[in-house]
Amino acid sequence: MPAIELKRTTNFRLPMAILGASLAADESTLLTGCMDGVYLSSVEAGTSTRVAQHSSYVSGVAWLPDQSHYLSAGYDGQMQWFDTATNKATRQQQIHEFWSWDMAVSPDGRLIASVTGQYLAGGYRYEPQPEREPSVVVLDAASGEILWKLPHVPSVQAVCFSPDSRYVAAGNLMGEVRIWDCNDGSLRSSWSTDEFTSWGIIKSHCYLGGIFAMRFTPDGQHLLLAGMGPMHDPMAGNGKQLWQKWAWQQEQPDKVAQINKDDGGEGLMEALAIHPQKPIFAMGGRLRGGDWNAALFDLNSGERLATLKTGYRVTGLQFSADGNRLIVTGTQGQPKPSREGSWEPFGRVEFYELG
């Protein structure tokens, strides 16, 4: 596949760091979850309005496919439903005792999944303690009823649904993946890949890293994972930018591809998106060392097709419905108060055309 040119067409800021984002179906409005609340932004005008808050950071947001409601999940363990017409909350529900690390809506709009878990040392090698609450929760999107509470090893930092909405997958700090059948809550597949976690022996004895983003391929046969490769010193955050592709439906799941050795620098990758029509995916995150912190790859060959060095931490990636644009969101630097005492905006939104 030939190289792809990425041309920036839209660029604006939000007051606070963006931890999650979702573009509306008509692509006129961007929904974002930020450190200080939920925002709706006009893509054309670049203006933003805060419409809701949690008692802590908002870690994830999503539109329901019919656009009647949008959702938010936060570090307070709550999930909120909002009526799109009024921007008023119609339901607030405590999902977890600890943070919601990640949240996803099934493609058919019937289900919501949220993942949680606090990493607490459980032994002399600081392996995680058993979960104190179910790490994966699957809910009915319409009623909020909890359908399944599913076990994992905390902390669980990434979740996604299969294209047919039948399966939900979750990945954790230790590079462990579990996939369940949403029809009956049964465990369908599980495996571990130690290339996504690190045991620190310098400065701090602990595990760091893990799987921070995951997506099923459009045919549902493979699962993409993103995070960071092992480090001798996890506190330095200098593990290799890493993605892997797994054939998960086999009796023994098999890693069929991963980032080419010379294509990645250093940094934690936190976001994945798959093109709606072409065999292309995007990965992005933080840059520790190298030439890029967001890039496009060929989904079949693994070839790198384009790169971006954004100058900020990328926390979200999404393609437009026609696949002609890539939406990149994140946070730049640390907040600094202005002369008037308010914070200088440090949430970032960029749109790129694919050429």
Image (cartoon, rainbow, N blue to C red):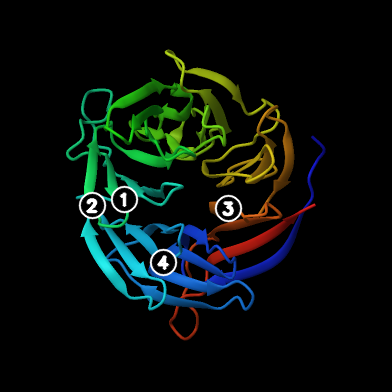
Residue at 39% from the left image edge and 21% from the top image edge:
191
Q: CA distance from mark 3 to mark 4?
A: 20 Å
Q: Secondary structure at mark 2?
A: loop
Q: Amino acid at mark 1?
A: Ser
Q: Which residue bears the numbered disc 1? A: 100
Residue at 70% from the left image edge and 43% from the top image edge:
291
Label 1 close to label 2 by CB (< 8 Å): yes
Q: Earlier in the sequence, mark 1 or mark 2?
A: 2
Label 2 close to label 3 by CB (< 8 Å): no
Q: Which residue bears the numbered disc 2? A: 95
Q: Which residue bears the numbered disc 4? A: 68
Q: Nearer the viewer's eye, disc 1 or disc 2? A: 2
Q: Amino acid at mark 2?
A: Ile
Where residue 318 is drawn, which disc sits there?
A: 3
> Where, by quadrant of the figure, is residue 350 drawn?
bottom right
Q: Secondary structure at mark 4?
A: loop
Q: Earlier in the sequence, mark 3 or mark 4?
A: 4
Q: Residues within 10 Å of mark 1 (few under 14, many from 20)?
A: many
Q: Nearer the viewer's eye, disc 4 or disc 1? A: 4
Q: CA distance from mark 1 to mark 2?
A: 8 Å
Q: Secondary structure at mark 3?
A: strand
Q: Amino acid at mark 3?
A: Gln
Q: CA distance from mark 2 to mark 4?
A: 21 Å
| Spot occupied by residue 316 in the image (x, y as percentages of width and height) | 53, 53
Q: CA distance from mark 3 to mark 1?
A: 20 Å
Q: CA distance from mark 2 to mark 3?
A: 26 Å
Q: Earlier in the sequence, mark 4 or mark 1?
A: 4
Relative to 69, 302 lies left or right: right
Q: Earlier in the sequence, mark 3 or mark 1?
A: 1
Q: Secondary structure at mark 1?
A: loop
Q: Earlier in the sequence, mark 2 or mark 4?
A: 4
